[in-house]
Amino acid sequence: QEGGSERGLVAQEEKEMSYVLKPTYGKQSVPVFKIEKLGDKHTIIDMVVKIMLEGEIKDSWLTGENHQIVPTETQKNTCYALALQNDFDCLETYGLALARDMLARHSHLQTVNLDMLERVWSRVEVQGKPHNHVFSSSANPIKRSCTMTVSRDSVKVSSGMKDIKLLKTTKSGFAGYIEDQYTNLKPVGAPGTSPDRILATELEASWTYNKIPSVGFKNRNEAIFQRLVETFSGPADTGVFSKSLQETAYKMAVSVLRSFEDVDEVSLITPNIHNYTYPLSQFGLNNDNVVFQSTDCHSTASGRIETVVRRPSARL
């Protein structure tokens, strides 16, 4: 019995050793706020950083020995130290400095993964003049985003924006869809129907670079975001008709790839924010798409459109 029991334990240990372990660890939700002081004029960058490390670190999982571990508190401190020691104007430049520092000082690490958000602040104007050191933001500000994978022989950077609300008050339709026994949606923009609707979304956009932009990440990101908004909007005086949010999202993504050769992939998440014409006819009032009942895509059932467009040559 004892021999059988020992063989059973050995077999169990061999079985466990056949598992594949893919360990990673780090620090999340690290708030880093920096003031750049150029004389009397200040600029700010308000970040939240998540850092995750990969490499020869498995002993902590397999044996409980921590000789390969850079403590997560040390990683947090490094986030602040690198923010102080480096000049940067965007998440991407900061992230590259942080990742390369970790790899340079710890030879057993192979990869640093960063997931960063920047909360956007606007400079206050006083009597039409930008203030040197006063800024404003909202409780739920627009956020710039950056995910980055930096290894010893490669860099992958994806930049983006979150919480961007876009809305057009006309020139939007949705018709020609499948109708079955459970369909009660009425077509919009089809012949003989209401000619338009509100098209609204809360955009989450990201784009993956194939190289570091020659104009710098900040300038390129601003240009890409402007192209996305211009494609959504159309000309200022006439706009552009949208047959569906899907069609519009695809055109937005393609416009970026056509305009910027240093981008390989564009990803757009565009939930439908529904606005329903309020039925005031029940009170004898004619409401010709003027007053609506709005909804919140986070708390109300809403459509969710995800669009990923990449170059055929992209190596992602």
Image (cartoon, rainbow, N blue to C red):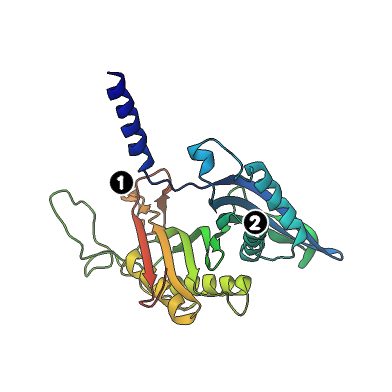
Q: According to the image, label 1 marks what residue?
A: 282
Q: Which label is found at residue 237?
A: none
Q: Is residue 307 above or below residue 214?
A: above
Rendering coords of residue 178 (x, y %): 17, 60
Q: Residue at x 62, y 43 (%)?
A: 72
Q: Nearer the viewer, residue 187 or 258?
A: 258
Q: Residue at x 36, y 70 (%)?
A: 250
The quarter holding residue 5 reads top left
Q: Quadrant of the N terminus?
A: top left
The answer to whether residue 8 of the structure is visible from this angle is yes
Q: Nearer the viewer, residue 187 or 51?
A: 51
Q: Nearer the viewer, residue 15 or 212?
A: 15
Name the residue type under label 1.
Gln
Q: According to the image, label 2 marks what residue?
A: 102
Rendering coords of residue 193 (x, y %): 24, 65
The span from disc 1 to disc 2 (Cα, nearest Å) is: 66 Å
Question: Which residue is situated farthest in the front direction here?
Answer: 3
Mark 2, Cα crowd under 10 Å, few <14 / some 14-19 / many 20+, is some
Q: Residue at x 65, y 56 (%)?
A: 102
Q: Is residue 41 above or below residue 47?
A: below
Q: Residue at x 51, y 48 (%)?
A: 24
- Helix, strand or loop at mark 2: helix
Contact, mark 1 vs mark 2 (Cβ under 8 Å): no
Rendering coords of residue 168 (x, y %): 44, 65
**N-terminal of the two: label 1 or label 2?**
2
Q: Is residue 298 above or below residue 252?
A: above
Q: Quadrant of the C terminus?
A: bottom left
Name the residue type under label 2.
Met
Q: Report the number of discs.
A: 2
